[in-house]
Structures are given as C-alpha cells and as structure tokens.
Amino acid sequence: MPPRPLYLPPDGRPRCAWCAAAPGDEQYLRYHDEEWGRPVADDFRLFEKLCLEGFQSGLSWRTILNKREAFRAAFAGFDYNKVARFGEKDVNRLLADAGIVRHRGKIEAAIHNAGRCVELVATEGSLAAYLWRFEPPKNSVAHNLATSEPSEALSKDLKKRGWKFVGPTTMHALMQAMGLINDHQPGCHHWKAAQQARDGFTRPS
C-alpha cells in the first residue's frame, strides 16, 4: 500500500495525514504534536485512554478530544480506584452530563473496567507495567495498520480478565497514542521527537 500524503497546515510543518480530519483545529494539532506517539507510564493517563477509546467507538477522536476535560471531571481524573466505586447514582449523574458522551453501555463499561483495573494492578504491579509488556518488537510489522499481533494479544488477554470495549483495533490505537510504537508517518515533522522520547523512555516493570 503506497504511503498516504502528509498533511501540510499553514505553519508549513508536515504532519500525519489523519490531522487533515480537523483543518485549523489547534487543539487537534497540539494533540498530534505533543501527545500522540509519546510514551506514557502514568497509570491514570493509560486508564483514561483505555476508557476514551471505548467512548470513541462510532465517533471521531476529535469529538472525544473536545470533551476530554469534561470526561476527566466526570470520571474523577480517571483514578480507577475511585471510578471502581461508582454506583447507580453516578451512572445517572453521568447520563445527565451534557459535557460527555451519554451512552449507558459505555459509561457502565468504564466503571466495570475500573474494577478490573484495580484487580490487574493488584496482580501485575501497575497498569503501565502490564501494558508495556505488549510493546511490539523493534522494526516489527505493527506500523501503519489498524490491528497487529501485539494488539490482538493484548485484547485477548484483557477480555480474558473481563474487560469490555477492548477490541484489537481499539488496543492498536492505544498503542499508537501512548507511544508503544512510533506510528508518525515518515516525513512527519514530529516523527523525530516521538522517536527520541521512545529512545529515552524507561519501560515500567
């Protein structure tokens, strides 16, 4: 498959083609430039991304990104210890919150997954240490794909542990966003910075 043409915004710095989905959206570009593809070891940020990928199902990432701060406020900063204790009153509160995606199934899945995350951390040490065990091998065929063998393995293992909304495509998007691979396109202005961040990153254990 030939490479997709890069997106060239007014600042003259070429970026990955997917940035063209939101021309002129500075928040979207900042997400691409400063977050996407940079390695993350913070459990709450990783849990946040797992939840938001689930909420994105059927929607665009731009929609979710625009609601991210509202999601953080609604879900206690994605502290899975707190979210795991949410009950029906919280579900009703979230269903009434116009700042987030009001989908009962996705809300209940996020709360359910928080409980599974508490269990996982108790056995694996941290969410970060667990997720980084699925980092694709260097120069593997995990790049520029919708799914990969590592994302399929991660999805299968999480499902075995009882997690929801963790399909292989969703898990591959997580790997791309959280820096388990550097999937910035060759020629993207931010490929080098993402790679340097990965090279200097200490994998959690």
Image: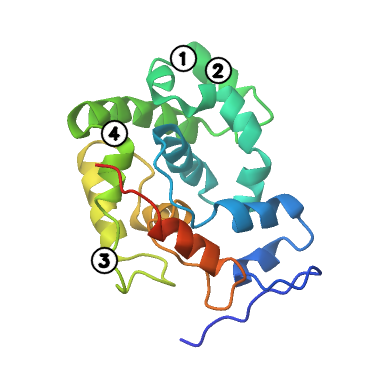
Question: Which residue position is annotated with label 3?
Answer: 137
Above/below status of 2 relative to 180:
below
**How far apart, in angstroms, are the residues tagged by discs 2 and 3?**
43 Å
Between residue 28 and residue 34, name the one nearer to us. 34
Residue type, label 4: Ser
Q: Identify the mark nearer the N-term, 2 or 3.
A: 2
Mark toward the viewer: 1 or 3: 3
Callout in the foreground (4, 1): 4
Indicate the amino acid at tag 2: Asn
Residue beneath disc 2 = 92
What is the number of the mark on residue 14?
A: none
Q: Residue at x 38, y 56 (%)?
A: 180
Can you see residue 60?
Answer: no
Assign a secondary structure to mark 4: loop
The residues bearing labels 2 and 4 have C-alpha atoms spaced at a distance of: 30 Å
Helix, strand or loop at label 1? It is helix
Q: CA distance from mark 1 to mark 2?
A: 6 Å
Task: Say whether marks 1 and 3 touch (CB < 8 Å).
Answer: no
Q: Residue at x 42, y 66 (%)?
A: 146
